[in-house]
Image (cartoon, rainbow, N blue to C red):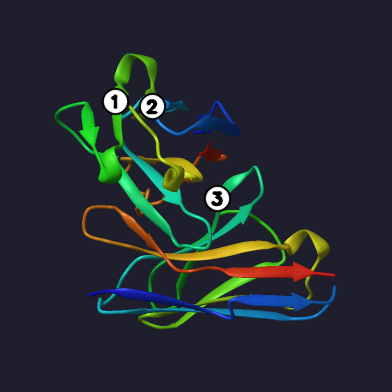
Amino acid sequence: SQTIHQWPATLVQPVGSPLSLECTVEGTSNPNLYWYRQAAGRGLQLLFYSVGIGQISSEVPQNLSASRPQDRQFILSSKKLLLSDSGFYLCAWRGKTDTQYFGPGTRLTVL
Amino acid sequence: AQSVSQHNHHVILSEAASLELGCNYSYGGTVNLFWYVQYPGQHLQLLLKYFSGDPLVKGIKGFEAEFIKSKFSFNLRKPSVQWSDTAEYFCAVKTLTTDSWGKLQFGAGTQVVVTP
């Protein structure tokens, strides 16, 4: 069966510091992968999606970036965090019937 | 641009009460519709989905939703809630365009609290 992992689970970072969040999927190959940010009262905002290694599409202009160095690995990064980057970050993969399956998420607090 | 609206941000109700959460979307073409649920401390998980066919779909834990195309709505219902239904509920829409790449657009979510 497929599983999706995210780490770290929680992170507290100062403004201006770099960021790297990792997402890995097991049990499937060449999945579509997605990064979302969940902010209170605002639902889930799609940040990036990827249909394959090295293929990244950005949905929202911001100081975040994403990379997919391996088939089942999806990384969210920033060179300099802003206060507004605080939130709950979710990674998801797309199953056969268009259903998306979500990871446990990373709670990021920028101080 | 497409949007998904959930009418209630917070709902508080007693056990055994009936629940209905509204969801409307703005897109004139064919859509796939989803309801996801996030229980406290757990992953976001699929509750039910509609792709085609019978507009009344049944999901896990006694939930159902009805797709009304003319109203662009996909409301979620449960006849009798339990304390364990306390969670945040998200409506999501996937538009069937050639370049959608499976992207989902989510509503803002509804926090449901069921009191004993």
Looking at numbered disc 3 in the image, what kind of residue is underneath it? Answer: Leu
Q: Chain of mark 2?
A: B
Question: Disc 2 vs disc 1: Cβ atoms closer than 8 Å?
Answer: yes
Q: Residues within 10 Å of mark 1 (few under 14, many from 20)?
A: some
The residue shown at (37%, 48%) is B100
Residue at the extreme bottom = A70
Q: Nearer the viewer, mark 3 or mark 1?
A: 1
Choose between A102 and B83: the one closer to the eye.
Answer: B83
Q: Residues within 10 Å of mark 3 (few under 14, many from 20)?
A: many
Helix, strand, or loop for circle 3?
strand
Looking at numbered disc 2 in the image, what kind of residue is underneath it? Answer: Asn
Q: Residues within 10 Å of mark 2 (few under 14, many from 20)?
A: some
- Residue marked by disc 2: B75
- Residue marked by disc 1: B66
Q: How far apart in space, not on screen, are marks 2 and 3 (Cα)?
A: 19 Å
The residue shown at (38%, 15%) is B71
Q: Position of residue B16 (x, y in %)?
A: 40, 30
- Residue marked by disc 3: A44
- The correct choice, above or below, for A7 with respect to B109 in the image is below
Q: Chain of mark 3?
A: A
